Amino acid sequence: MEQAPSEQTAELATVEEARTNLRQRRIVDAGIAVQGSMNTMSAVEYLRRRDIGAAVIERVLLEPHRRRSRS
């Protein structure tokens, strides 16, 4: 059974979002590692250069208790 065009579009958007989220998660994880091995400013610059938003950077680097759990 074929999907309606709107269902195909929604499914494709979900796949693209998942790819972006996976990419961002990997970058954030690497930024946290940079913070641990170097310092917070190096981690901030690493994340900023990779287009991670300021709110995310602040949360993951300065408020580790607010990091999202891994699933």
Image: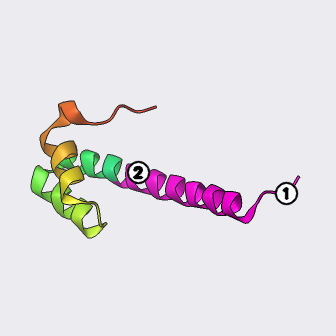
Say which of marks 1 and 2 sits in front. 1
Q: Is residue 66 above or below residue 62?
A: above
Q: Residues within 10 Å of mark 2 (few under 14, many from 20)?
A: few
Left or right, 25 with respect to 19, comes to left
Left or right, 24 with respect to 34, comes to right
Residue indicated by mark 1: 2
The verdict on residue 14 being magenta is yes
Q: Residues within 10 Å of mark 1 (few under 14, many from 20)?
A: few
Left or right, 70 with respect to 56, comes to right
Point 46% across, 31% down: residue? 71
Q: Of helix, strand and loop, which one carries label 2?
A: helix
Quadrant of the rendered image containing residue 60: top left
Tell me residue 67's x, y (percent): 26, 36
Magenta-drawn segment: 1-27
48 or 12: nearer the viewer = 12
Tell me residue 55's x, y (percent): 19, 53
Q: Of helix, strand and loop, which one carries label 1?
A: loop
Disc nearer the start of the sequence (1/2): 1
Identify the colour scheme used: rainbow
> Could you give the CA–CA distance between mark 1 and mark 2, rounded to whole angstroms?
34 Å
Kind of residue sitting beneath label 2: Arg
Residue indicated by mark 2: 26
Tell me residue 63's x, y (percent): 14, 38
Kind of residue sitting beneath label 1: Glu
